[in-house]
Amino acid sequence: MTDKVNFLPPEPIKLIDEDTESDELTRPFISNESNNFDTISNISMSNIGIKKIIISDCTIVTGDNGTKFAVWKMTLILKSDPTSTMNGGPPLIQLYKRYSDFERFRSKLLIKIREVRPDLRNLVPELPPVIPWYKSWDYDHLNFDKKWLAKRRIGLERFMSQVVSNSQITELASDELKKFLET
């Protein structure tokens, strides 16, 4: 049996920051490494310096017990310091996440925001939908369909972009965001 790796070309969405009041949030991250890759653990999350998030490269993986699942490549393009001597563009962080990781992250955001400010619970955006229960008999076929995965990728990218661009979410749930981006 041959395992195939499916590639879905990225269809980025444009994130526009119209928040002029959040000077504290726009302070850049500076990478200390000569390449443009860094890790979240080297970055202070007290200021969210993420310029753009791209979800791409869906890879279908077969687990130990034979079940298949999709792994998404998440690239964080960080705001760069114009006074930095670093060449080659802004620093990048690349992570790999499953849909279930995004579900757990959203649940943690909701719990944290309910604890601190229950009135702001609706700030947390929705994730793209899962396969409806009444179609679960054809789950493997539907869940790995290219069109379905393309829609899910767009939804995940929109979700993450809305989370990091919302200053209220990043302030109230900065620890949850940091943990999600570290693992």
Image (tube, rainbow, N blue to C red):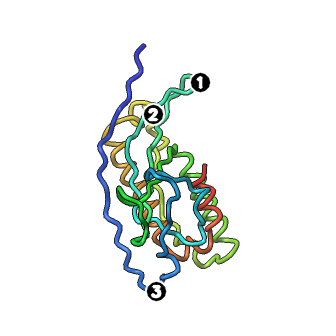
Q: Position of residue 126 (x, y in %)?
A: 48, 61
Q: Of residues 180 and 119, which is closer to you in this image? A: 180
Is 2 on the left-hand or right-hand side of 106?
left
Crowding at mark 1 (Cα within 10 Å: few <14, some 14-19, many 20+): few
Q: Secondary structure at mark 1?
A: loop
Vertical placement of residue 101 versus 81, above or below? above
Instruction: Read off the residue under disc 3.
Output: 21
- Depth-wise, is mark 2 or mark 3 nearer the camera? 3
Q: Earlier in the sequence, mark 2 or mark 3?
A: 3
- Residue 128 makes an appearance in the image: no
- Residue 16 makes an appearance in the image: yes
Vertical placement of residue 61 versus 118, above or below? above
Residue ID at (64%, 76%) = 118
Residue farthest bottom in this picture: 21
- Depth-wise, is mark 1 or mark 3 nearer the camera? 3
Can you tell which mark lies on residue 139?
2
Distance from label 1 to label 2 (Cα)?
19 Å
Q: Earlier in the sequence, mark 1 or mark 2?
A: 1
Q: Position of residue 98 (x, y in %)?
A: 52, 43
